[in-house]
Structures are given as structure tokens and as C-alpha cells.
Image: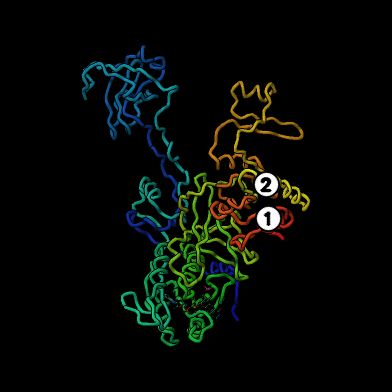
Amino acid sequence: MYKQYVSVQEALEIILAHADEPMIEVVKLEDCLGRVLAEDVVADSPIPSFHKSPLDGYAVRFIDVKDAKPDQPVTLEVIESVPAGHVPALEVIVGKATRIMTGAPLPQGADTIIKFEDTNVQKDQTQHYENSSQHVDIYHVPKSPGNYSHVGEDMEQGQLIVTKGRLIDAAVIAVLASFGYHEVHVYRKPNAIVFASGDELVSVDQQPSYGKLRNSNSPSITAQLIAWGVRAQMGGIVPDQKEQIASTLLAALDSHDFVVTTGGVSVGDYDVMKEVFQAIGAEILFWRVAMRPGTPMVVAKWKDKMIFGLSGNPSAAYISCELFVRAFVRKIQSLSDVWREPVRAMLTRSVGKVVGQDRFLRATASVSREGSLLVEPLATQKSGILSNLIDANCLIYVPASKQKIHSGDSVDVILLHPPTASNHELNRAKDIPLFGFAGFANSGKTTLVCKVIARLREMGYRVASVKHDGHSFQMDQEGKDTWKHRQAGSEAVTITSDSQLAFIDYRKYEREEQLKQALSHIRDVDIILIEGFKTLSIPKIYVVRNPDLLHHAYELPMVEAIATDFSLEQQKLPVYDINDVEGLSRYIVNRVLGES
Ligand SMILES: Nc1nc2c(c(=O)[nH]1)N[C@H]1C(S)=C(S)[C@@H](COP(=O)(O)OP(=O)(O)OC[C@H]3O[C@@H](n4cnc5c(N)ncnc54)[C@H](O)[C@@H]3O)O[C@H]1N2
Ligand code: MOO
């Protein structure tokens, strides 16, 4: 009996265990772009192979020119001119110089190149120096000799330059060309065919009648495979009819390294894919992965060929393909990083989780102006929804154990494409959860923050806080030593003792940079409470005691709850009494520390 409901990790391990070593073939250099290198490239000669000039100028002896200055030039006699590709005939001896072009070999005796801009030729320029006595004035010299390209400066003889398993791009091609690889050993491209199953499907060029739809999976899966280096072809639509699928598959398996199908892998009356795989003698490696989307996936092996039966739901098929088929495809091409390592990103919107399975949420990752990675889950996560794949450049991985992920959380993200630039402004320097209290003057937010700090302390949490002051506060005292440092011109004064440390930075920062700077000094606490900074994107409680200001709760970014002392009609946001320190503290703990 085959395995059912394997974990994501197990599914990956099983698939990779069946990914065989690739074969090697030889292709011409001009055909190797995008292929995978099957041999190590070791420098069989140094590059450059001769000392060469990196400038258009004069090759000289440093000792002759070292004292040259703009008002005291040194004059040398020019003995010859060497273009690139030509060999110098004469040695540079005392008082002589060779006119030299970029890329030309350094003449004997010379150890320094003076660029044209630092020289002045005294006579008419001529190509023939043997009988003329042309001179050059040198006005400026480098600090030391040796400003030419040395033998092996770029690549030393015997050095390993590119390792096998590397995807060949233009840079690798430059190296291959430099060492004379007019033919290159590469791993053979795997070939594959993609079928779609379902009586409801019509091909792309047809008009679907009621109840039917166009087959979008085959083109998209084929495109994914091609992008990963597979010679993939679309095998068309097969009806939900066992014998027909079986014969189609057998013919396809014969001439392809692996086969991908979509649809027919769930528990419906016409979900026949698994049975067909068994009927043609394939071994089912597993059926169903404990993840969403993409639960109903069946992976089988027929002789030495793999069959991936992906879900019919377009985004489930796309995501399973991105994760599992891609890993397989990379392994059989000997590429590394078969599984994209997740990176951490800050979630900008909370999401609840409806299933007790690992989830991969379609999302948009972006880099904030300060360089933090942010991630925004897309509005709908239904596996039948195709359109939001357009905006999904990443998947948020939410392990089965998490019930909800909250905005401000640090989450695992699998990047499918590079993140976009973001207009989000906050950069959290550390992974400590932040929670804010925002309000206008006299809202009572300081009193509330202090009570919450005290309560969180009682609950055993280590708390740090950051306060934004709308005015210019005074930390320094006139006449004290830190004040004297400041007066002397120090831009940031730090004072420490065995019991405390204070850092006073006198530079002006934009609002979000102020918070970033403040956060960069905090570590080893469980939570950081932020008072003020109401316009920044951090999860926050809006504190309000003036009904006229209530509307800001819905205008400021990331307000999650309201704390007030007046009674309110039904609100979209949860409302707490401003004195309900226990309730508010529990909310914060629950919310950002994931505990209750
Ligand atoms: N009783 C249950 N029903 C379902 C379960 C379950 O656990 N119990 N799982 C659901 C989940 S989750 C998924 S995902 C789907 C997967 O079903 P199949 O993989 O068998 O796929 P189909 O039923 O063939 O199709 C699903 C859906 O996708 C459309 N589709 C199919 N192929 C294509 C294509 N080539 N291009 C575009 N769209 C396609 C198809 O019309 C369906 O709407 O099962 C749930 N059911
Ligand atoms: O496993 Mo299915 O792909 O979520 O709908």
C-alpha cells in the first residue's frame, strides 16, 4: 500500500530519492546558454597571460618619474609605441618611456603606466620613434609602481573557476570562451510531456460551451517546465476515460523522461488518475500531501520514469509544480538548491487559517525603502483561483501548527520571483514583535502604555519601549560631560555606566528612520511597545478620548483595536475600555506573541 497524506518534507524526499543522475552530452559554446555545466572549469593558463597595460598612456620606470608634479614635470624620451596585440621591441631604460595602448603587453623594464591625461607630448605625434626624439612630460604619478594588470590577476593557472552543476549564463560563457571551450560538456536536458484530464476541458483555440472551460493547466505547466530547462511539450487533453488515459500515458512514457498530468486525482467519481497509474503498472509512491493548496497529488514511478499527477485546480497545480516538480527537475539536471530556502519577511496583513495543514499562501513580496522584506498575502487563497497567480511572486509558508498569522509577524516566504520595490516605510531591524499605541495629544496613551508595560512585566515578559516626542526633548544637561562632547562637535554621544546606557544622536532623521534607529539598539526583550509614530505601518491600538477624533482609527495604518473611555456604537474594529489594562495586555500578548 502506498503512503497517504505525506508531509511536504516527506513528499520532497520521496521525489528526490527517485531523481536519477543526469546524462552528459557535448554542445557547441554558442548553444550552451541556459544549460547546466557538467565539467569543472579549471584555468589551464593564467589570465591575463602577460603583464598588460590597463590604460592608454606611457609605460615608464617608477623610479624615473616618482617626483613628478604638475608644476615640476619629469621629461622622458619616448622610444616606441605599442598597440594592443603587438609585442614591445625595446626595453624601457633610465629616462625612457614607451607609448602604450590599453591591452598591450608591458615592455621590459617598465613597472608603471602613466595615463595620457597626466602627460603632455612635446613634439608632433608620430608612429615611428626610431629616428625621432619625441619627448613626453609626466605631470602626475601613481603612489606606487605596479599599476598594470599582472599575469594571473584575473584567473590564476590551476584555479577552479566554475564548478559543474552551474547554470550557464553569459558570465560562464565568457569564462568558457577565455579558456577555449568551443564545445562544452553539459547535462542532457530532460524531456517531458504534460497532459490535462477532464471531460470539461476544451483546447485553447475552442469556444467553451456551458459547463466547459479552456485547458489552462497544460500551457502553464509546460511553460514552468521550459523555464526550468526541460524540453517540455503539451500533450493535449485526455478525457476522464481510463483506457484512453492508460494508452496515452504508456505511449508518452516510452519517449519521455517524465510525465505530468493535471486533474482527476481527488476522490470524485471520475478522478481516475491514480487507478490508471496502477493499471499501467506504475508504483504509486504517494497520494495526497498534507498541504493546501495541492493536497490531491499523486506521484508514481513507471520503470525508471516518474509520473506527477497534479491537481486540476489551476493554482494548486501551479504551486505543486513550483515546489515539487521543480525540485525534481533541478535534481535531474544536477542543479543545486532544489528547494528554495525560505527567507523571513514581515507580514503586512493578518490571515486566519482554516485548515490544519501546511499552507502555501500566494503573496506579494516587496522590499521597503529601508531594505526590509515585506510580504502581503493576496486577497483570495482558493485553489481554483487562477488570476492572483499573476501577482504572486512568493508563497508564504504557514506550518500546520499555526492557527493565524498576524500583521507584523516574521513569516517564512518562498520567493518564486524577485521581490518588487515597496512604498512601505518601516524597517524592523530585529525579529522582536512590535506593538504600537497611537493617539493625539491628551488621549491618555502614555498612561495606558505605562500600565500595559507594568502588566506585561507582571506576566513575565521582558518589555522595551520607544516613545516618539513631537517636540524637541532634552536629555543632556548643560555643563555635563556628554554636553561638552556635543559642544565639541560629536554627532552622537553615548554614555554608559554599569547600570545603564544612553545614546543621544543629534542628527536629523525622517520619522521611520527614527524608529529604525531606536529599534536597532534594542535586543533581548520579548516585545517592543511603540508610543507615537502613528503614521508608520506597525500593528497598533488607537487611543482616543475625543469622539471627534474616532475616525482616525480607520485612517491610520494598521490600527487593530480602539481603546477609549466613551461608549461606542458597533464598530468594525474591536473596542476596549481605556482602563481595561488586563484585556488590552491579553490582546497584545495573544496578537504578537502568539500566546493566550
Ligand atoms: N470530496 C472531496 N472533494 C474534493 C476534495 C476532497 O478532499 N474531498 N479535494 C478538493 C481539492 S482540495 C482539490 S485541489 C480538487 C482537486 O481535484 P482534482 O485534482 O481531481 O481535479 P479536477 O477535479 O479534475 O479539477 C479541479 C478543478 O480544476 C479545473 N481544471 C481541471 N483541469 C483543468 C485544466 N487543465 N485547466 C483549467 N482548469 C482545470 C476543473 O474544471 C475543476 O474546476 O478536488 C476537490 N474536491
Ligand atoms: O488541495 Mo486543493 O488544491 O486546496 O483545493
Q: Is residue 128 visible?
A: yes
State the image quarter where residue 90 is shown.
Answer: top left
Frontmost residue, 357 versus 554:
554
- Assess disc 2: are there few (<14), some (14-19) or many (≥20) residues with their C-alpha within 10 Å of its C-alpha: some
Q: Amino acid at mark 1?
A: Ile
The quadrant the N terminus occupies is bottom right
Instruction: Judge whether 458 appears above or below 89 on screen.
Output: below
- Residue at (51% x, 76% y) in the render: 301
Label for residue 444? 2
State the image quarter where residue 197 is shown.
Answer: bottom left
State the image quarter where residue 110 is shown.
Answer: top left
Left or right of 202 on screen, residue 339: right
- Assess disc 1: are there few (<14), some (14-19) or many (≥20) residues with their C-alpha within 10 Å of its C-alpha: many
Q: Amino acid at mark 2?
A: Gly
SS for dot 1: helix
Instruction: Judge whether 59 appears above or below 569 on screen.
Output: above
Viewer-nearest of discs 2 and 1 = 2
Q: Is mark 1 within 8 Å of ligand 2?
A: no
Q: Name the residue that disc number 1 marks.
A: 588
Frontmost residue, 237 versus 516:
516
